[in-house]
């Protein structure tokens, strides 16, 4: 593990060690460069920054609280578990943080048509929400499989005025939705802004999305010491920070401000699906290899010929065969650990948090909760674990109730 905190400052040139970059066709090169230059300018513009934080406060309802899950901690035994409540944001997840930033950028670039991909639908809902607020045309690409298991979010997007376009190719999930969104962008570069929802994709998206999401970790750096002091705890930093990882935006949002604090373990939780050795999972870091997907070099699930493999997760938002390049880099450096949680374990944690805390988590976030429960049981109550509860579970009711694992988990 590196001992040089400043070495974590990477991504300005599009690369995180050997990962990242911008591998796009000539037809997209100009649009991507236009976006890069615009973000390079506005990320340091005081008026842009002020408006962004005003929107987060007045529209999203930030800061989201850090909550001591006392009953969950007592039932688990061991370390104390704390939840960063991103589920309380307007639209019900962390996605709105990044969406506001990119939509503000689109307006300044004169782009009046927004396209986006979505898996679990939370990013799509956030995009449709902000397009309604700013008066922008909105087209959301969503895999037909995800549309079936996330009907409440499909209905929300349509109610907000978005056109939801089903994708029926490949596995009909997030990867395929992203493919179709990129094809749309190629055909409409003049008036269209592609609003990517994760820290994946070509430069500048991994850096830009991370920057907008770091509000999560920055808030925690202020909130956690104050909460610990109220509880009579002597430390000012958690022993571990845990977040689920699909593409990885919620995890990077909470990890990045903690990178220089070497005493804090950073743990990303991937979807192990039916098991890491089953072939039915979405664990790109633990079972992937280096390749290029959606414009950047990262760790992806692929066969020996470089063909992207199909994935599986009970949570639509983690059902992606790649991961953001900065996560791949942090894994290579050893600064962050990446583990797997199965569908069954996530569903059990979903039920447990509902039962003992009165909080219904998204299935994506349930993966992080599940690993926190597992880790807490190995530690003492002098230890603290901070979990990014990235979204709420309203959208997952049908999936949970219809799951063959439901009865066993409940």
Image (cartoon, helix red, strand yellow):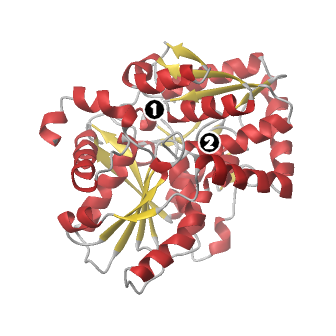
Viewer-nearest of discs 1 and 2: 1
**Which quadrant of the view contains residue 85?**
bottom left
Q: Do tag 1 and tag 2 residues touch (Cβ < 8 Å)? A: no
SS class of the residue under badge 1?
loop
Q: CA distance from mark 1 to mark 2?
A: 24 Å
Q: Where residue 120 is drawn, which disc sits there?
A: 1
Q: Nearest the camera: 376 or 354?
A: 354
Left or right placement of residue 384 versus residue 218 in this view: left
Q: Quadrant of the C terminus?
A: top left
Residue 349 on image: x %, y %: 26, 49
What residue do we see at 40% from left, 64% from top? 67
Q: Where residue 297 is drawn, which disc sits there?
A: 2
Crowding at dot 1, Cα within 10 Å, few <14 / some 14-19 / many 20+, comes out as many
Q: Nearest the camera: 396 or 327?
A: 396
Q: Residue furthest left?
A: 408
Crowding at dot 2, Cα within 10 Å, few <14 / some 14-19 / many 20+, comes out as many
What residue do we see at 39% from left, 42% from top? 364
Residue 180 on image: x %, y %: 61, 19
**Which quadrant of the view contains residue 398?**
top left
| Image height of 231 relative to 130, above or below | below
Q: Residue furthest front?
A: 58
Residue 8 seen:
yes
What residue do we see at 56% from left, 72% from top? 222
Residue 237 seen:
no
Q: Where residue 336 is drawn, which disc sits there?
A: none
What residue do we see at 85% from left, 38% from top? 108
């Amino acid at each position: 593990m590196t001992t040089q905190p400043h070495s974590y400052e990477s991504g300005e040139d599009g690369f995180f060690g050997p990962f990242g970059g911008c591998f796009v066709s000539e037809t997209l090169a100009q649009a991507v460069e236009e976006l890069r230059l615009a973000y390079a300018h506005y990320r340091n513009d005081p008026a842009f920054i002020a408006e962004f934080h005003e929107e987060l406060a007045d529209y999203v309802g930030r800061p989201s609280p850090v909550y001591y899950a006392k009953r969950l901690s007592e039932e688990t035994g061991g370390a104390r578990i704390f939840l960063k409540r991103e589920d309380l944001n307007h639209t019900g997840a962390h996605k709105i943080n990044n969406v506001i930033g990119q939509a503000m950028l689109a307006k300044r670039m004169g782009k009046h048509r927004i396209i986006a991909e979505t898996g679990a639908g939370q990013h799509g809902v956030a995009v449709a929400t902000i397009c309604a607020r700013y008066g922008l045309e909105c087209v959301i690409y969503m895999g037909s499989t995800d549309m079936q298991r996330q009907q409440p979010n499909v209905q929300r997007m349509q109610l907000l005025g978005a056109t939801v376009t089903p994708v029926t190719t490949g596995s009909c999930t997030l990867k395929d939705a992203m493919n179709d969104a990129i094809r749309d962008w190629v055909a409409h570069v003049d008036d269209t802004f592609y609003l990517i929802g994760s820290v994946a994709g070509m430069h500048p998206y991994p850096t830009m999305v991370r920057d907008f999401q770091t509000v999560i970790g920055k808030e925690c750096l202020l909130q956690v010491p104050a909460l610990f002091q109220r509880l009579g705890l002597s430390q000012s930093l958690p022993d571990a920070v845990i977040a689920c990882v699909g593409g990885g935006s919620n995890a990077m949002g909470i990890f990045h401000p903690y990178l220089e604090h070497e005493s804090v373990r950073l743990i990303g939780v991937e979807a192990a699906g039916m098991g890491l050795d089953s072939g039915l999972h979405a664990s790109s870091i633990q079972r992937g290899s280096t390749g290029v997907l959606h414009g950047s070099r990262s760790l992806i699930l692929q066969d020996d010929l470089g063909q992207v493999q199909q994935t599986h997760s009970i949570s639509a938002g983690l059902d992606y065969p790649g991961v953001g390049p900065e996560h791949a880099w942090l894994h290579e450096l050893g600064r962050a650990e990446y583990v797997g949680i199965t569908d069954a374990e996530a569903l059990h944690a979903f039920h447990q948090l509902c039962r003992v805390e009165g909080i219904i988590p998204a299935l994506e976030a349930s993966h992080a909760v599940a690993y926190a429960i597992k880790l807490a049981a190995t530690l003492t109550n002098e230890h603290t674990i901070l979990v990014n509860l990235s979204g709420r579970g309203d959208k997952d009711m049908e999936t949970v109730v219809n799951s063959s694992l439901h009865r066993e988990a409940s």
